[in-house]
Image (cartoon, rainbow, N blue to C red):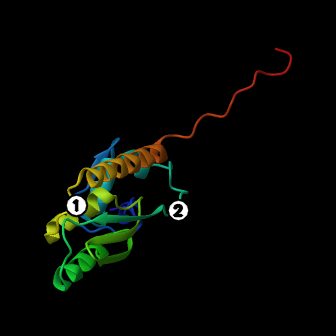
Amino acid sequence: MSALSDICPVCGMKTAPEVAAIEYHKMFFHFCSEQCRKMFLDHPALYSGKIGKEQSKILKRRTMSLAEPVDDEIRKRIISSLMKMMGVQEVTAEKGKVSVTYDLRQVTEGRIEEVLAEVGTKLGGGWLDRLRRGWVHESEETELDNLAAPPAPKRNRPPPGV
């Protein structure tokens, strides 16, 4: 294994041998966690080359409404589960709302919602909640796609006198 394959392309941590590698453009990429592997699969151009490498963290703060307030035990499970995710910086859960600060380069709100479902919480089902979540998912995907796009070429000017 080369030194390059010892570093996760998504988060920069040491790779784990139990996480399956991915072949992309005839190169193999190794990951530290299944979460990083999924992020790579969603946006391989962002993590496979020099594009976006110079970018620092992209912190997002989102508040999600839950279908109902949670008790202390569920609240602790929510916070514990979300804090185990790569890129999650801060979590608060109170009065039927969960607020999360996270690095978009490592995790999306969609992945956070999946963990909330695994813990057993249901998100607010009103049309406004669903609309907001859909908008956030789309805007995050667009932002990641834009980061993965190659830089625009510099404007070429014809040589003087032509």
Look at label 2 and name its amino acid.
Ser
Residue 98 shows which numbered tag? none
Residue 101 is drawn in which quadrant?
bottom left
Q: Position of residue 26 (x, y in %)?
A: 33, 42
Question: Which of disc 1 and disc 2 is earlier in sequence?
Answer: 2
| Mark 2 crowdedness (10 Å alpha carbons): few <14, some 14-19, many ≥20 | few
* Image mark for residue 124: 1
Q: Position of residue 52 (x, y in %)?
A: 50, 52
Work out whether 112 lies above or below 22: below
Q: Is residue 115 above or below residue 128?
A: below
Q: Which mark is residue 56?
A: 2
Residue 131 point in image, percent of width and height: 30, 48
Which of 6/8 is in front? 8
Tell me the element at label 2.
loop
Q: Residue at x 19, y 77 (%)?
A: 70
Q: Residue furthest top?
A: 162
Number of labels in the image equals: 2
Quick check: 23 left or right of 62?
left
Q: Secondary structure at mark 1?
A: loop
Residue plotted at (51% across, 40% down)? 150
Observer-nearest of 88 and 138: 138
- Is residue 110 visible to the viewer in this orientation of the structure? yes
* Residue 29 visible in the snapshot: no
User: Where the C terminus falls, by quadrant?
Assistant: top right
Residue at 36 percent across and 46 percent down: it is 138
Q: In the rendering, at what x and y percent does residue 63 appear?
A: 35, 66
Kind of residue indicated by mark 1: Gly
Q: Residue 64's image quarter?
A: bottom left
